[in-house]
Image (spheres, grey):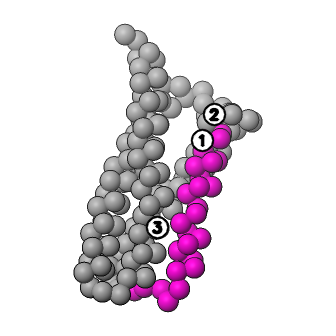
Amino acid sequence: MRLIQWYPYLKAIHVAFMVTWFAGLFYLPRLFIYHCEANDQPSLDRFQVMERRLYAIMTLGAVTTILFGLLMLWLNSSLLDFYWFRLKLLLLAGLIVYHLRCRHWITRLANDDRPTSTRWLRWFNEIPVIFLLGIVGLAVIKPL
């Protein structure tokens, strides 16, 4: 079997782990909000454990998504010729920054540095939707 024939399999794995990554990105900031609103020590401890475990799972999803994306790009480097694909990579870079920002919040909350208001976290919770719509929209529609 020629290497390029593996492309659909790589794409399927890429998409499956992207779903895993985004599931974590959608839920983790919601945990931050719950964590900030918790008042008892058992709840605070529970949220810290949940946040760390979910971050580990979504990081595995992120690394696997990126790895299989790079494998597909290696098999089809002509994708870099398309503006939509370069824009998708830019959104991916932003998503990685967002992912790392979630790590910052885990550390901050573990140190009991909770904001007085969860308003910013409620907005922060919505950011992955923009990335998802942008990345999937560009990959499916290929507009430019």
Up-down: is 53 above or below 88? below
Q: Position of residue 107 (x, y in %)?
A: 35, 75
**Element carrying mark 3:** helix
Q: Earlier in the sequence, mark 3 or mark 1?
A: 3
Residue at 61%, 36% (x, y): give it. 139
Q: Could you tell me residue 23's position as x and y percent?
A: 44, 52
Q: Mark 3 sits on what residue?
A: 29
Q: Which mark is residue 108?
A: none
Residue pointed to by mark 1: 136
**Residue 25 left/right relative to 44:** right
Quadrant in the rendering for residue 142 = top right
* Labelled pair 2, 1 in contact (Cβ < 8 Å): yes
SS label for mark 2: helix
CB atoms of marks 3 and 1 within 8 Å: no
Q: Which residue type does callout 2 highlight?
A: Val
For badge 1, the amino acid type reads Val
Is 112 placed above or below 77 here? Answer: below
* Secondary element type, mark 1: helix
Residue nearest the observer in this picture, 97 or 38: 38
Q: Is residue 2 visible?
A: yes
Whether residue 104 appears in magenta in the rendering, the answer is no
**Residue at 47% across / 37% down in the picture?**
15
Q: Does the segment drawn in magenta span residue 124?
A: yes
- Report if the CB atoms under discs 2 and 3 are less than 8 Å apart: no
The magenta-colored residue range is 113-138
Count of picture labels: 3
User: Quarter-wise, where is residue 52 in the image?
Assistant: bottom left
Residue designated by label 2: 140
